[in-house]
Image (cartoon, rainbow, N blue to C red):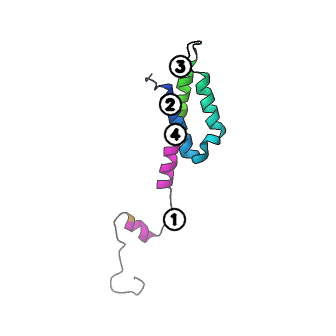
Amino acid sequence: MAALSSPLRVCRGILKELRSSKGPGYKQTLAYYFVLDQFRKNQVTNERHCRARREALHASHSYLCLLASTRHHLTLHKLFHGKGEREPEQVARLVGLQLPTQPGGKGWEK
């Protein structure tokens, strides 16, 4: 298993992904409060030792990976999403080709 990042780094990463998806008002969302509450609940202090710390850190790291992957997927989908049906001339120009013309001037070519 790969080494997990520090809890603070993972928490900041999740909040960064929330900010990028929700915009400037991300601090008023339930997801923001839930993430902070979960990280505070599983925090190790002098008085108590959280037994499920590693499990919670792994779950939060997986959630961060899901959020980042979703954002990357949406970016790629917007970039490469199909534009619908194109005319043969446009498709030929896309790949750097030209459609042949009728020699002799039949009158229908441009």
Discs 2, 3 touching: Cβ within 8 Å: no
- Mark 1 and mark 2: Cα distance apart in space: 43 Å
Discs 3, 4 touching: Cβ within 8 Å: no
Q: Amino acid at mark 4?
A: Lys
Q: Label 1's element?
A: loop
Q: Where is mark 2, residue-wise?
A: 10
Q: Is residue 23 above or below residue 44?
A: below
Residue at image location 50% in from the left, 54% down from the top: 78
Q: Is residue 45 above or below residue 71?
A: above
Q: Is residue 68 above or below residue 83?
A: above
The answer to whether residue 6 is seen in the rendering is yes
Q: Nearer the viewer, mark 3 or mark 4?
A: 4
Q: Label 4's element?
A: helix
- Mark 1 and mark 3: Cα distance apart in space: 51 Å
Magenta segment: 69-93
- Mark 2 and mark 4: Cα distance apart in space: 10 Å
Q: Which mark is residue 54?
A: 3
Image spot of residue 42 (x, y percent): 59, 21
75 in the magenta segment = yes
Q: Amino acid at mark 1?
A: Glu
Image spot of residue 75 (x, y percent): 49, 50
Q: Nearer the viewer, mark 2 or mark 3?
A: 2
Q: Label 2's element?
A: helix
- Mark 1 and mark 4: Cα distance apart in space: 38 Å
Q: Residue extending furthest right?
A: 30
